[in-house]
Amino acid sequence: MLACIRRANLDAMAGKSPLTIRGHLVETIAVLRNAERINKTPSYHPRGPFPLGDPVGMGLAIDMLTKSVVAKGRLVNYVQFSTIRKLRATYTKNWESSPSGVLEGASFAKGVGRVRPTSCPSQSEWFSQFQRGMEYRMGSQSEPNRGLLMGAIVYWLSLVMMDAEEAEESGFHADANELWKVGAYVCILTAASLRGHEGFFVDLTGLREHLSAGRFGVIPAGFVIDKDSLFTEEICKDLPHVTVAMLGHFKGETGVDQHLISLANESVSGLKTRWWIEKLVSVCEAEGRVHGPAFASAHGILASSADYNALFRKYLGQVQDETDFIPGETDVDAQYSTFRTPRKSSTTRLERAGFGDEFVDRMNRWRSQEGAKGRAVKRRMNAHYAEAVLLMPTTWLGSYVL
């Protein structure tokens, strides 16, 4: 414990830039010398003694340092700073729910920018410096998910389809249904450029409600792929498209309601989004489910992200063995996952096709959040079908060029 206290103090000292510390030291020495010349007591406050207690969060700092030593990390033999810092949020929430914290519940303003005075130790200046110094010392080692070529994802889907059909023919319908769902999940993540956890927001009721719209759409004659293409509402309605319905908190929007994204039925590279969504709906109906989360068990229990991710990596290993899409020396388990790989694959494809960051942001519905400059976005989450159609110059085109 004494070693942790010493380490915490050293980290707090390193929380400021050495140049800043040196500058304060030079000024302090100058003031002391000048005060001595004129026989004046220095204006600085006494350096002690400090009162008994822990007003600065030393106890929390010790907890964080102890965890960094004894806990097992995923990438290295200790947990990294990004994981350890979560203890501060837990401590703060514990304080806010305590008798002391409840009495501090008033704030100066409403919304995201509210200011609330607090005596919570985790918010002290010393603790902020400690945490910054600890981050400088520990650094970070990450293995971000890599993207895939669209051909790899299309091939991945073909492998899943093949095994699902074989399972159905053998009478293993539960296994087949699981594969159909995982295939639809990866296809939707890629086409809509979503993160893995957002795929579990897909709502079965919304999928069924809008499934027929856009099934027999036609691309206008002489159509040219251009990120600046503008379509009228009438043209958008007639495009071959399928609508993905999301339910829940999504992309920083306010409220809980449906959020609709209209995508191309099939992309240039052969990503058959409509086919997979229709298969997903038919599988859910065969299980007796017509509402609730689309990616769930036959009993309506939300699917496990870990299970879907395991299947995703399993078939990626097969893609690696059978094609040249993934280099043989690549560690599939370490560098690919459903959390970011499908989205990185689609955004990379869009950028390579000449669609800039602004278009990618619109595709992911971040534009309104960024435009609010940190304030809460003042609009409901509910995007009616008509509004989803109006967004198709972005969402349809973005999913079509994949």
Image: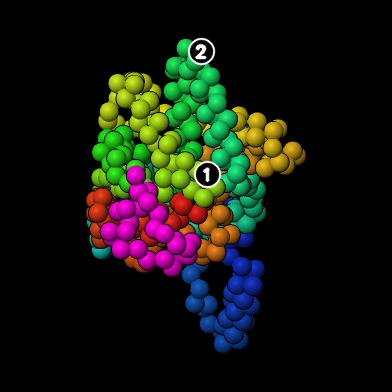
Q: Which residue is mark 2?
A: 170
- Going from N to C along the chain, the mark reached first, 2 or 1, is 2
Residue 62 drawn in magenta? no
Instruction: Name the spot of residue 279 as percent of width and height, x first.
Output: 40, 31
Image check: 154 left or right of 332? left
Residue 101 lies left or right of residue 32; in this view the side is left
Residue at the image point whose x is 52% and y is 78% from the top:
41
Q: Residue at x 48, y 31 (%)?
A: 182
Please name whichever residue, 348 or 37, is drawn nearer the observer in this view of the structure. Answer: 348
Q: Amino acid at mark 1?
A: Gly
| Residue at (30, 48) in percent of width and height | 259
362 or 140: nearer the viewer: 362
Residue 136 lies, in percent from the top left, at 62, 57
Q: Considering the numbered disc 2 on the image, is that residue within a helix, a strand or a loop?
A: loop
Please give the label number shown on residue 112.
Answer: none
- Whether 254 is drawn above or below 202: the answer is below
Is 233 in the magenta? Answer: yes
Q: Amino acid at mark 2?
A: Ser
Q: Quickly name the residue at label 1.
A: 270
| Of the pair 79 and 122, the residue shown nearer to us | 79
Span highlighted in magenta in the image: 216-240
How would you classify the magenta stretch by its main secondary structure?
loop
